[in-house]
Image: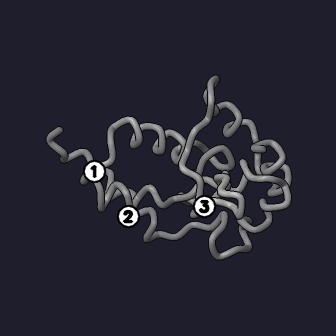
Amino acid sequence: GVRACAAELGVDAAPALASLPDGELAFNAIALDAQGRPVPVLHSDLGFALMLQQPPAELIERELAAVMRPFPAGLMTGVGMVVANGAYADAALRPLFGPDRYHGAVVWSWQQALLAAGLARQLARGD
């Protein structure tokens, strides 16, 4: 979980743990495994939905809440939003989404720009 991931990466778990909701945590999985089960890796693909679709407000709120939490509970770090966060995955999967992986705990500026532009687009909606 979040505490174990923080320890593995040498980051302070306190802000991340404090940001977690009291109830159930929900976010879109990164993929499905071979048995069709969601792979619980938090990711930055929300920017695409915000930029290219008109998701319902409830989905936007849920996904933004997950993304905006401090890493490793969410995706936000002091230098920006990481691309993927394996904190909620099994311990065996977490290294596949570490800071040494292309699709891992790394910051891509274009993903941040996409999220910002998508948020602006959603805020301009008339509904």
Q: Quadrant of residue 100?
A: bottom right
Residue 108, how many percent across, how many down? 52, 70
Quadrant of the drawing holding the C terminus: top left
Near mark 3 (Cα within 10 A), the count class, few <14, some 14-19 or many ≥20, is few
State how far apart marks 2 and 3 are (Cα): 21 Å
Confirm or deny contact between disc 2 and disc 3 (CB under 8 A).
no
Horizontal side of residue 94 vs 45, given as left or right: right
Which numbered tag is attached to residue 31?
3
Q: Quadrant of residue 34?
A: bottom right
Q: What residue is pinned by disc 1?
A: 54
Q: Nearer the viewer, mark 3 or mark 1?
A: 3
Q: Nearer the viewer, residue 6 or 42?
A: 42
Q: Residue at x 80, y 57 (%)?
A: 9
Q: Amino acid at mark 3?
A: Ala
Residue farthest along the top direction in this orientation: 22
Horizontal side of residue 25 vs 3, given as left or right: left
Horizontal side of residue 126 vs 121, given as left or right: left
Q: Residue at x 75, y 44 (%)?
A: 2
State how far apart marks 3 and 1 are (Cα): 21 Å
Quadrant of the drawing holding the N terminus: top right
Q: Amino acid at mark 2?
A: Leu
Q: Is residue 80 visible?
A: yes
